[in-house]
Amino acid sequence: MGSFNFGIFPLLERYSKFKFDWEPGYLEMTRDFVFMNTFKSMEVFFKTFRDHGTKPEMECYDMGHIYNVAFMAEKGFIEKPFFLQLIMGILGAIQPSVENLLHMKKTADSLFGDDYIWSVLPVGRHQFSLGIVAAVMGGNVRVGMEDNLYLGKGVKVKSNQESVQKIRGMMEALSLEIGTPDEVRKMLKLKGKNQTKF
């Protein structure tokens, strides 16, 4: 939901070997990389989503991005209920902490009231712990290998299924409810799989 510095170059200091030749150059490139998403580009994206009956996920990597959602809604580009993905942990954006998560949630509450659904996506080692905090707060959780390659300290994940099973087990141990695919479609007011073209 906005432009920001997207730095993953510190991984160069963590690893001495890479599987592919292109990896070190790609990581180094992010030292001078801005993930650009202007208001004009957001207008184009949201118009395309609206014209095709697609529900957008609003990825908020920083506090200003939440205010950008409010602005785009005020201008009529997106409709309630909004689906906010609060992303934490990329260098150049908001960092993972309970305090930052509470601040993002409180800001969204003040702007949208009950007219939004939210999820948290902490990158790296905070994925499960902050995911549980979000679930206890009434939010939703996103996990997977795109953002975290470990199930725990020193234990590499083998599949997205492992990550989902772990967070599900943690949530069930706390008596938190797990939504079914149909329940999630209803909650987000999605058009349904039978109305898509793939």
Image (cartoon, rainbow, N blue to C red):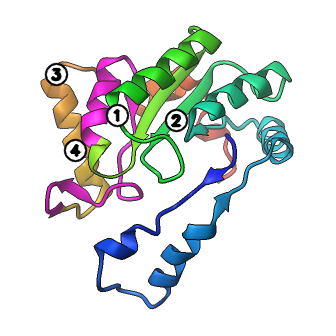
Q: Which mark is residue 43?
A: none
Q: Which residue is mark 2?
A: 85
Q: Dot 1: within a 10 Å radius of its alpha carbon, few (fewer than 14), some, or many (20 or more) residues?
A: some
Left or right: where does residue 78 sit relative to residue 95?
right
Is residue 148 magenta-colored? Answer: yes
Residue nearest the observer in this picture, 163 or 14: 14
Can you say whether 43 is above or below 163 in the image? above
- CA–CA distance in space, label 2 to label 4: 21 Å
The reply to whether discs 2 and 4 touch (Cβ–Cβ < 8 Å) is no
**Which mark is in front, 1 or 4?**
1
Element under disc 4: helix
Q: Earlier in the sequence, mark 1 or mark 4?
A: 1
Q: Are marks 1 and 3 in contact (CB under 8 Å)?
A: no
Would you name the residue on which mark 3 appears? 174
How many angstroms separate mark 4 from mark 3 (CA)?
14 Å
> Is 93 included in the stretch rendered in magenta?
no
